[in-house]
Amino acid sequence: MAKLSYRVEIEDAHAHLFRVTLTLPDPAARQRLSLPVWIPGSYLVREFARHLSDVRAEQGGRPVPLAQLDKASWEAECSGGAELV
């Protein structure tokens, strides 16, 4: 199994904005990506995805179609051979 990697950078400390980059070395043709909605042991629904802005994907420096399936899930239409960023 390929190893996922994340990179977190401070975009604007005063505005509490961060740039998070996820890299998948060997994505599926229709790669599904999602964020949790709740934390185990908690009764509150958190909906972490509501804090996201400017969600996008690319392979080999080219944009990849990214469709939002619901509040916390997306699907990327990938082509073979390149990592998904």
Image (tube, rainbow, N blue to C red):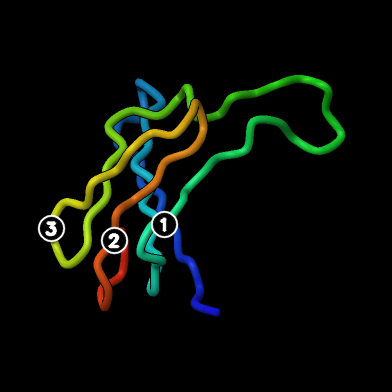
Q: Nearer the viewer, residue 19 or 51?
A: 51
Image quarter where the C terminus lies is bottom left
Secondary element under disc 3, as helix, strand or loop, is strand
Q: Are marks 2 and 1 in contact (CB under 8 Å)?
A: yes
Q: Residue at point 36% right, 52% down?
A: 21
Cα separation, mark 2 vs mark 1, equals 7 Å
Instruction: Compare residues 49 and 16 and report the one nearer the observer.
Output: 49
Percent position of residue 27, x then y? 39, 67
Mark 1 nearby-residue class (10 Å; few <14, some 14–19, many ≥20):
some
In this figure, which residue is indicated by the disc labeled 3? 62
Q: Residue furthest right?
A: 41
Secondary structure, mark 2, is loop
Could you give the CA–CA distance between mark 1 and mark 3, rounded to whole angstroms? 16 Å
Asked if residue 57 lies left or right of residue 8, the reply is: left
Q: Amino acid at mark 3?
A: Arg
> Mark 2 highlights which residue?
78
Q: Are marks 1 and 3 in contact (CB under 8 Å)?
A: no
Instruction: Determine which residue is flagged by label 1.
Output: 31
Earlier-in-chain disc, 3 versus 2: 3
Q: Residues within 10 Å of mark 3 (few under 14, many from 20)?
A: few
Q: Is residue 79 left or right of residue 63?
A: right
Structural distance between the alpha carbons of marks 3 and 2:
11 Å
Write down the quadrant of residue 59 in the picture.
bottom left
Furthest-left residue in this view: 62
Q: Residue at x 52, y 43 (%)?
A: 34
Q: Is residue 16 above or below residue 83?
A: above
**Residue 39: which quarter of the image?**
top right
Amino acid carrying mark 1 in the image: Gln
Residue 78 relative to residue 26: left or right = left
Q: Secondary structure at mark 1?
A: strand
For marks 1 and 3 on the same chain, the one whose residue lies earlier in the sequence: 1
